[in-house]
Image (spheres, rainbow, N blue to C red):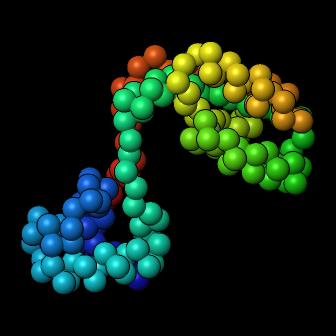
Amino acid sequence: MALDKVDIKILAALQEDAARSSAEIAQVIGISASTCGHRIKRLTTEGYVRKTIAILNREKLDMRAQFFVKVNVLQHDPQYVREFVERMKTMPEVLECHVLLGAFDFLLRVVTPDLRSYEAFYFKKLTCIPGVREASTSVSISEVKMTTALPLR
Protein backbone atom coordinates (compact mmCIF):
# COMPACT_ATOMS: atom_id res chain seq x y z
CA MET A 1 0.00 0.00 0.00
CA ALA A 2 1.29 3.47 -0.88
CA LEU A 3 2.00 5.97 1.88
CA ASP A 4 -0.04 9.16 2.00
CA LYS A 5 0.79 12.49 3.65
CA VAL A 6 -0.79 11.42 6.96
CA ASP A 7 1.32 8.23 7.03
CA ILE A 8 4.46 10.30 6.42
CA LYS A 9 3.51 12.68 9.25
CA ILE A 10 2.92 9.74 11.59
CA LEU A 11 6.28 8.19 10.68
CA ALA A 12 8.02 11.54 11.18
CA ALA A 13 6.36 11.93 14.60
CA LEU A 14 7.39 8.39 15.58
CA GLN A 15 11.00 9.08 14.54
CA GLU A 16 10.99 12.21 16.68
CA ASP A 17 9.61 10.54 19.82
CA ALA A 18 8.11 7.04 19.67
CA ALA A 19 7.30 7.16 23.40
CA ARG A 20 4.35 9.48 22.70
CA SER A 21 0.94 7.86 22.69
CA SER A 22 -1.06 7.56 19.49
CA ALA A 23 -3.47 10.13 21.00
CA GLU A 24 -0.62 12.64 21.41
CA ILE A 25 0.62 12.01 17.87
CA ALA A 26 -2.95 12.30 16.55
CA GLN A 27 -3.37 15.67 18.23
CA VAL A 28 -0.13 16.99 16.73
CA ILE A 29 -0.99 15.95 13.17
CA GLY A 30 -4.71 16.67 13.36
CA ILE A 31 -6.46 13.28 13.10
CA SER A 32 -8.49 11.19 15.53
CA ALA A 33 -6.69 9.03 18.08
CA SER A 34 -8.33 5.85 16.81
CA THR A 35 -7.38 6.59 13.19
CA CYS A 36 -3.83 7.30 14.30
CA GLY A 37 -3.66 4.08 16.33
CA HIS A 38 -4.92 2.02 13.39
CA ARG A 39 -2.44 3.64 11.04
CA ILE A 40 0.48 3.08 13.42
CA LYS A 41 -0.50 -0.57 13.71
CA ARG A 42 -0.73 -0.90 9.89
CA LEU A 43 2.60 0.87 9.35
CA THR A 44 4.22 -1.48 11.86
CA THR A 45 2.57 -4.60 10.42
CA GLU A 46 3.65 -3.61 6.90
CA GLY A 47 7.26 -3.22 8.07
CA TYR A 48 7.66 0.57 7.85
CA VAL A 49 8.42 0.59 11.58
CA ARG A 50 11.01 -2.08 12.34
CA LYS A 51 11.15 -1.57 16.10
CA THR A 52 10.68 1.04 18.78
CA ILE A 53 13.74 1.68 20.93
CA ALA A 54 15.27 4.12 23.39
CA ILE A 55 18.45 5.85 22.28
CA LEU A 56 20.74 5.92 25.28
CA ASN A 57 23.29 8.58 26.18
CA ARG A 58 26.55 6.67 25.77
CA GLU A 59 28.61 9.29 27.64
CA LYS A 60 26.42 9.00 30.75
CA LEU A 61 26.92 5.24 30.53
CA ASP A 62 30.72 5.65 30.34
CA MET A 63 30.90 4.56 26.70
CA ARG A 64 32.80 7.66 25.68
CA ALA A 65 35.07 6.22 22.98
CA GLN A 66 33.74 5.72 19.45
CA PHE A 67 35.72 4.23 16.58
CA PHE A 68 35.16 3.60 12.90
CA VAL A 69 37.04 0.54 11.72
CA LYS A 70 37.60 -0.36 8.08
CA VAL A 71 38.28 -4.07 7.69
CA ASN A 72 39.69 -6.07 4.80
CA VAL A 73 39.41 -9.84 4.71
CA LEU A 74 41.43 -12.42 2.81
CA GLN A 75 38.46 -14.31 1.40
CA HIS A 76 35.46 -12.88 -0.41
CA ASP A 77 33.44 -16.06 -0.82
CA PRO A 78 29.83 -15.79 0.43
CA GLN A 79 30.30 -18.36 3.21
CA TYR A 80 33.23 -16.48 4.75
CA VAL A 81 31.41 -13.15 4.51
CA ARG A 82 28.36 -14.68 6.27
CA GLU A 83 30.61 -16.09 9.02
CA PHE A 84 32.34 -12.73 9.52
CA VAL A 85 28.99 -10.93 9.68
CA GLU A 86 27.65 -13.46 12.20
CA ARG A 87 30.75 -12.91 14.38
CA MET A 88 30.15 -9.15 14.27
CA LYS A 89 26.57 -9.69 15.46
CA THR A 90 27.86 -11.38 18.62
CA MET A 91 30.20 -8.55 19.62
CA PRO A 92 28.40 -5.99 21.82
CA GLU A 93 31.04 -3.35 21.08
CA VAL A 94 30.10 -3.40 17.38
CA LEU A 95 27.04 -1.18 16.99
CA GLU A 96 27.05 -1.23 13.19
CA CYS A 97 28.62 -3.44 10.54
CA HIS A 98 28.35 -2.52 6.87
CA VAL A 99 29.54 -4.48 3.83
CA LEU A 100 31.34 -2.07 1.49
CA LEU A 101 32.27 -1.86 -2.14
CA GLY A 102 35.62 -0.18 -2.71
CA ALA A 103 38.97 -0.20 -0.95
CA PHE A 104 37.65 -1.91 2.20
CA ASP A 105 35.28 -4.83 2.73
CA PHE A 106 33.54 -3.80 5.97
CA LEU A 107 32.96 -0.67 8.02
CA LEU A 108 32.33 -1.09 11.74
CA ARG A 109 31.14 1.44 14.31
CA VAL A 110 32.57 0.38 17.65
CA VAL A 111 31.90 1.89 21.08
CA THR A 112 33.93 1.18 24.21
CA PRO A 113 34.47 2.93 27.54
CA ASP A 114 37.98 4.09 26.62
CA LEU A 115 41.03 3.57 24.42
CA ARG A 116 42.39 0.70 26.53
CA SER A 117 39.09 -1.17 26.17
CA TYR A 118 39.23 -0.65 22.42
CA GLU A 119 42.78 -1.99 22.36
CA ALA A 120 41.55 -5.19 24.06
CA PHE A 121 38.67 -5.46 21.57
CA TYR A 122 41.02 -4.92 18.63
CA PHE A 123 43.70 -7.41 19.62
CA LYS A 124 41.66 -10.04 21.48
CA LYS A 125 38.52 -10.11 19.35
CA LEU A 126 38.67 -8.41 15.96
CA THR A 127 42.12 -9.30 14.67
CA CYS A 128 41.85 -12.85 16.04
CA ILE A 129 39.09 -13.66 13.56
CA PRO A 130 40.56 -15.97 10.92
CA GLY A 131 40.85 -14.23 7.57
CA VAL A 132 40.99 -10.64 8.83
CA ARG A 133 43.81 -9.19 6.76
CA GLU A 134 43.71 -5.55 7.77
CA ALA A 135 41.83 -3.30 10.19
CA SER A 136 42.24 0.46 10.02
CA THR A 137 40.82 2.47 12.91
CA SER A 138 39.68 6.09 12.98
CA VAL A 139 38.88 7.64 16.36
CA SER A 140 35.87 9.92 16.64
CA ILE A 141 36.89 12.91 18.75
CA SER A 142 33.56 14.74 18.50
CA GLU A 143 30.08 13.78 17.37
CA VAL A 144 28.73 16.60 15.22
CA LYS A 145 25.49 14.93 14.16
CA MET A 146 23.88 11.63 15.05
CA THR A 147 20.37 10.77 14.04
CA THR A 148 18.33 7.70 13.33
CA ALA A 149 15.67 9.76 11.54
CA LEU A 150 15.27 9.10 7.83
CA PRO A 151 14.68 12.11 5.55
CA LEU A 152 11.02 11.50 4.77
CA ARG A 153 9.46 13.09 1.72
> In the rendered view, does 5 fall on the left or right side of 71?
left
- Can residue 12 be seen? no
Examine the image and state in which quarter residue 52 appears.
Answer: bottom left
Q: Residue at x 25, y 67 (%)?
A: 10
What is the quadrant of residue 98 in the picture? top right
Q: Quadrant of the N terminus?
A: bottom left
Residue at 37%, 29% in the rendered image: 60
Count of picture labels: 0
State the quadrant of the C terminus.
bottom left
- Side of 145 where 71 appears, left or right: right
Q: Quadrant of residue 96?
A: top right
Task: Give the image location of residue 2, x and y in percent.
Answer: 38, 78
- Where does the image place residue 140, in percent across and percent down from the top left? 50, 21
**In this image, 112 relative to 87: left or right?**
left
Which residue is at the front of the view, 18 or 76?
18
Residue positioned 89% across, 35% down in the render = 131
